[in-house]
């Protein structure tokens, strides 16, 4: 049986120069930093990686480069979801060819499929491409909610191995944990939080880990919080997590990845590039963000 994915997975930014061209030197440096810091895996070109504003060619080039830089040391999860099933199959298939270990598939956004549409969408991808797949539910961005009973029908497919759930509700988590326990005799099914501000309690209640925006900024600490939870040192995990409550909020003070890219630029890790329609962090938030970064000794 395949080992379950557990721990801290960074939803990695895609570094860009001020004119928006991709910066592969900065990408390589970020990968090295994450591996040194104990990050358990890298999500390449997800929401935080600006998947929506990269061309297909650029998207695949970032996945390929990330795979090459990581060089087998930790898993690479390629963002390959789309609101077109055919496009998702193509990107997933190409990501597999480029050496990605897993794919992350966001629910179709904007076109609002019903639950039957979601089932057919995900089964078609899972039948078409033989690579382990993690489903991604983020209703606040997609206007579409993958319900637990729908997941139950999908989780039996051998290629569907986990879910990233960004709905930070305790009730939803409990239902997902129950599903992962139900199919445990067949395979490991990982349940990840996609919400930094609630991931610690999510893990304390049985979640496997987090796919994190905050890990871009404090990779070592997010990894430590995950390790503490996985070794059942819940009080220590809670104490460490509480230090970053303000950071978690600031990372979503404007649309992700605007704040995280601004912070990484101030830390000297990336250039200031971000692609339209996203624009750099509004000046009204600079001082507040800077003060928190100073407090956390990030500068």
Image (cartoon, helix red, strand yellow):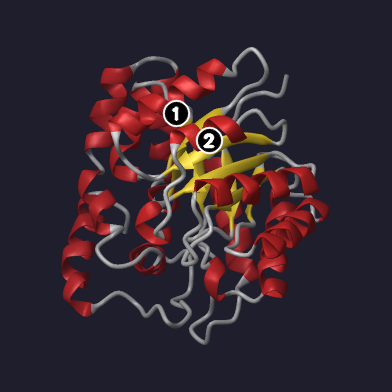
Residue toward you, 47 or 22: 47
Q: Is residue 158 in view?
A: yes
Residue at (58, 66) in percent of width and height:
26
As measured in the structure, the alpha-carbon distance from the residue carrying label 2 to the one carrying label 1 is 8 Å
> Crowdedness of circle 2 by 10 Å Cα count: few (<14), some, many (20+)?
many
**Which mark, by number, is residue 227?**
none
Whether residue 35 is visible: no
Label 2 or label 1, whichever lies nearer to me, is: 2
Q: Position of residue 283 (x, y in %)?
A: 21, 78
The residue wearing badge 1 is 176
Front-most of 265 and 154? 154
Q: Residues within 10 Å of mark 1 (few under 14, many from 20)?
A: many
Q: Position of residue 268 (x, y in %)?
A: 43, 66
Q: Is residue 299 above or below residue 150?
A: below
Left or right of 109? Residue 2 is right
Please identify the quadrant where the C terminus is shown.
bottom left
Discs 2, 1 touching: Cβ within 8 Å: yes
Determine the residue positioned at 60% across, 74% down. 54
**For the residue labelled by badge 1, is the local secondary structure a helix, a strand or a loop?**
helix
Q: Residue furthest right?
A: 97
Tell me the residue that label 2 is attached to.
151
- Which quarter of the figure is the N terminus placed in? top right
- Secondary structure beneath disc 2? helix
Q: Is residue 145 left or right of residue 168?
A: right
- The residue positioned 54% from the left and 75% from the top of the image is 53
Q: Is residue 142 above or below residue 169?
A: below
* Residue 100 pos. (x, y %): 73, 49
Depicted 235 relative to depicted 286: above or below: above
Using the rendered view, name the quadrant where residue 289 is placed: bottom left
Give the quadrant of residue 74: top right
Q: Earlier in the sequence, mark 2 or mark 1?
A: 2
């Amino acid at each position: 049986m395949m080992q379950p994915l557990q721990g801290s997975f960074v939803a990695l930014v895609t570094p860009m120069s001020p004119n928006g061209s991709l910066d592969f030197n900065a990408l390589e440096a970020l990968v090295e930093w994450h591996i040194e810091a104990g990050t358990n895996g890298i999500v390449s070109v997800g929401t935080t990686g600006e998947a929506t504003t990269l061309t297909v060619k650029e998207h695949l080039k970032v996945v390929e480069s990330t795979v090459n830089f990581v060089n087998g040391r930790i898993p690479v999860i390629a963002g390959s979801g789309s609101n077109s099933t055919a496009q998702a199959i193509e990107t997933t298939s190409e990501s597999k060819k480029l050496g990605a270990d897993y794919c992350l598939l966001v629910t179709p956004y904007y076109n609002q499929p019903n639950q039957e549409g979601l089932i057919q969408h995900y089964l078609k991808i899972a039948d078409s491409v033989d690579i382990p797949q993690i489903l991604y539910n983020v209703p606040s961005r997609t206007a579409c909610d993958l319900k637990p009973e729908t997941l139950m029908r999908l989780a039996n497919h051998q290629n569907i191995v986990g879910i990233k759930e960004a709905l930070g509700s305790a009730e939803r988590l409990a239902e997902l944990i129950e599903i992962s326990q139900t199919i445990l005799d067949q395979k490991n099914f990982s349940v990840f939080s996609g919400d930094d501000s609630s991931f610690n309690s999510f893990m304390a209640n049985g979640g496997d880990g987090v796919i994190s925006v905050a890990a871009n900024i404090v990779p070592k600490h997010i990894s430590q919080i995950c390790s503490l939870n996985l070794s059942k040192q819940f009080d220590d995990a809670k104490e460490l997590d509480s230090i970053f409550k303000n950071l978690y909020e600031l990372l979503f003070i404007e649309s992700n990845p605007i704040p995280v890219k601004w912070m990484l630029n101030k830390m000297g890790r990336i250039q200031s590039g971000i692609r339209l329609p996203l624009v750099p962090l509004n000046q009204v938030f600079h001082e507040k963000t800077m003060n928190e970064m100073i407090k956390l000794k990030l500068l």
